Amino acid sequence: MAEVLEEHGTDRWNFSHLPEVVVFAESRDDVVAVMKFANERGIPVTTRGAGVGYVGGCVPVEGGIALSVVRMNSVVEIMPEDGVVVTQPGVILRDLQVAVSELGWYYPPDPASLNECSIGGNLATNAGGPRCLKYGVTKNYVLGLEVVLASGEILHVGGRCHKNKTGFDLLHLFVGSEGMLGVITEATLRIIPHPQTRAMLTATFPEFVDAAGAVQAILNSGHLPSALEITDEFTLKAARAYLGEGSLRPGKAHLIVEIDGRAKAVASELKELEEVLNFFLALSSEFHGAPGAAHAPGAQR
């Protein structure tokens, strides 16, 4: 159908090139069959997950086969005892986070598209997100992969061991490779205990240099927020034009500081952070969240 080809010929950046056919894989064996078929005939294959990226990796620029793994969407195993979750590539990141959160565990990578992006796409692009400051990016949570190569051969790299340091690091060749080295059909990912609570502090500043100074002071004073985001005057003007002039407090810079951890520690850290922000001439500051409240399962953001 024309609409299926069109849907699988583009990503969120709106660059497009139609494939000749779309194949929906439902298992590793399906992927093996497609790759063998294509390899024997010299047909280009472009693997596709949720298709919500902005980097063009899932756009079939050579035509051929668009190989969708969205139907491979099962969380195979969650093992808090081992600190791992095993998942197929079509699982939506948000769904995976909720599933492990309900057991009191945490998968930290948080790209902006977490409600709709797939794990396979996260692995292919080495997705990050605001919390990479404290927790790192996707590659820091990949322990093992099952990959189907262009020839149709199945390769297992890494494993379940958190301290796997022996031999060539083939595992991380695939993470961030945009699917050019093989099709990921299963991933073993590291999970960690979920923070008890989370809170956010926002502040506006008269000048960007004041906000930048506050950022450096926060880090120099020994704080490691889970996320730190700074917005300049140009971006604030665009936001106010879109949301309304009164939507954001006055100032030429805006800073968001997010912290997490044990409830008592978060409450204490918020007070210290406010002192730092006020020292750097914050025009206003505001708390978000309830640092005294325990974590609610499934509440990730």
Image (cartoon, grey):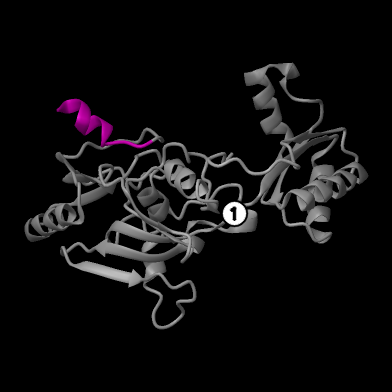
Which residue position holds label 1?
132
Give the side of residue 124 with respect to residue 209, left or right. Answer: left
Estimate the x, y position of residue 297 in percent, counting from the top left: 55, 42
> Over which residues does the magenta segment extend?
1-11
Q: Residue at x 11, y 59 (%)?
A: 36
Which corner quadrant of the image does residue 222 belong to? bottom right
- Residue 256 lies left or right of residue 105; in this view the side is right
Q: Residue, x 39% and y 42% (percent of image)?
A: 92
Image quadrant of residue 234?
top right
The reply to whether the magenta stretch includes residue 155 is no
Examine the rendered structure and indicate whether residue 3 appears above or below residue 186. above
Quadrant of the drawing holding the N terminus: top left
Q: Count numbered badges in the picture.
A: 1
Q: Amino acid at mark 1?
A: Cys
- Asked whether 5 falls inside the magenta stretch, the response is yes
Spot the residue most to the bottom: 167
| Category of crowding for the residue at label 1, using alpha-carbon neighbours closer than 10 angstroms: few (below 14), some (14–19), many (at least 20) | many
Compare residues 104 and 55 and report the one nearer the observer: 104
- Measured as percent of width and height from the top left, residue 2 is found at 17, 27
Q: Is residue 125 visible?
A: yes
Q: Is residue 97 left or right of residue 237?
A: left
- In the picture, the quarter occupied by the C terminus is top right
Closer to the camera, 32 or 11?
32
Picture coordinates of residue 133, whole percent (x, y): 64, 55
Q: Residue at x 72, y 20 (%)?
A: 247
Q: Is residue 187 above or below residue 168?
A: above
Residue at 44% x, 73% y is 161
Which of the pair 45/276 is nearer the observer?
Answer: 276
Q: Position of residue 211 (x, y in %)?
A: 80, 43
The secondary element bearing badge 1 is classed as helix
Would you say residue 108 is visible in this rendering?
Answer: no
